[in-house]
Image (cartoon, rainbow, N blue to C red):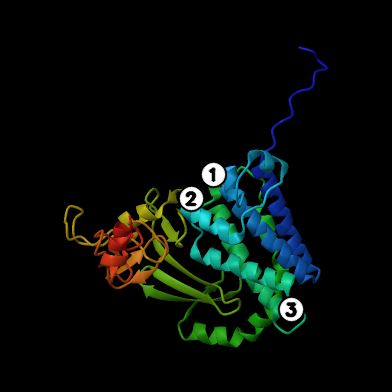
Amino acid sequence: MNANAKKPEQERDPIRDIVANAVDFLESATREFRKGRPKPSIIAFHSAVELFLKARLMHEHWSLVVSKGPSLTQFQSGDFVSVTFEEACDRLVKIVGHPLPERARRAFDALRKHRNKLVHFFQDLEAPGVKEQIAEEQLHAWHALSGLLSGPWREIFERFDIDIAKLDRGFADHRLYLQTRFDSLCEVLADLKKSGADVRECGACKYQAAEVETVVPGLFDGVCHVCRYATRWLMTECSDCEKPLRVTGDENSLCGYCLTNHLPGDIAERIDQDPATYDDMDKATPANCSWCDGYQTVVMYQDHYICTACLELTGVIGICGWCSEGNNGDMEGSTWKGCNFCDGRAGWERD
């Protein structure tokens, strides 16, 4: 072989490029916020979120990031229209089969709406409370994104150089913006603690201001008095190491001790308290969830029914009048209109 012959150029990894750009935008978002420039901060943060969503789609297939008429040649040259936020979320559900957790989607959508407002309309960014609102929105979105990267999306993105701890430190000024609010609530929080309330550190803003309430034994709701971040979680045991496992209603739950991933279906089977056996035809669970479209993720728990995919708690299970599937939603009229997993008699007659 000729020593002077050129080696074939190493094939580029488009996902790696997208992730690198997304990290750059995140760093830019925190840097611009620190400089007192909220508008470019919001635009950069929104761009970072969209790029991470597109990288997740591209992990399945490159064509999923193209809005219409995918062409490999145009994709490789960058001559294409990429999917919007709504299209990306829709494809994660219908094609990939792994939807965004509802609270992550809400946090990202708040960013999208704020970005559109700034780009297309006017907002007085110096008005009282606006910068605090921006700090809240970005902290919520970062909490959701970092949770995806270290949890359900961990195996996909761990090969990339994403220093989550370093990025989290970049949000120091966001949290500092909420210091005044925390200081003003010190007496309120102290009174809550004296009255026996369970006040813990907020996962988003890191202030000791999240009031936790027990919904039913093992299921908790938390709301931060500073940044208003709301969350729900279920405490159970890891099926491998039997250490405490925090289930947050994501695509899967990662054990903090042995790093075992637990899918909602696995958790459902483990915590189901329905006394009937699986051979019993009258057994109501596992059932399907009408809130998140979870398949057989609803089980009996503490005299209620809980979905291990979204943690929605309900009192009853209904039966679809057409397909006979159990469901935690309103099954009135289901013989005709069907449920989440069938089109009912109307669909049958239409076909």
Tag shown at residue 39: none
Q: Which residue is identified by label 2?
A: 95
Q: Are marks 2 and 1 in contact (CB under 8 Å)?
A: yes
Q: Which residue is identified by label 3?
A: 123
Q: Nearer the viewer, mark 2 or mark 1?
A: 2
Q: Which residue is identified by label 1?
A: 60
Q: Is residue 194 visible?
A: yes
Front-most of residues 238 and 99:
99
At horizontal 60% and vertical 78% (from top left) the residue drawn is 226
Mark positioned earlier in the residue sequence (2 or 1): 1
Disc 1: CA contacts within 10 A as few (<14), some (14-19) or many (>=20): few
- SS type, badge 2: helix
Q: Determine the CA span between mark 3 and mark 2.
A: 37 Å
Q: Residue furthest front?
A: 350
- SS type, badge 3: loop
Mark positioned earlier in the residue sequence (3 or 1): 1
Q: Residue 122 placed where, x, y %? A: 75, 77
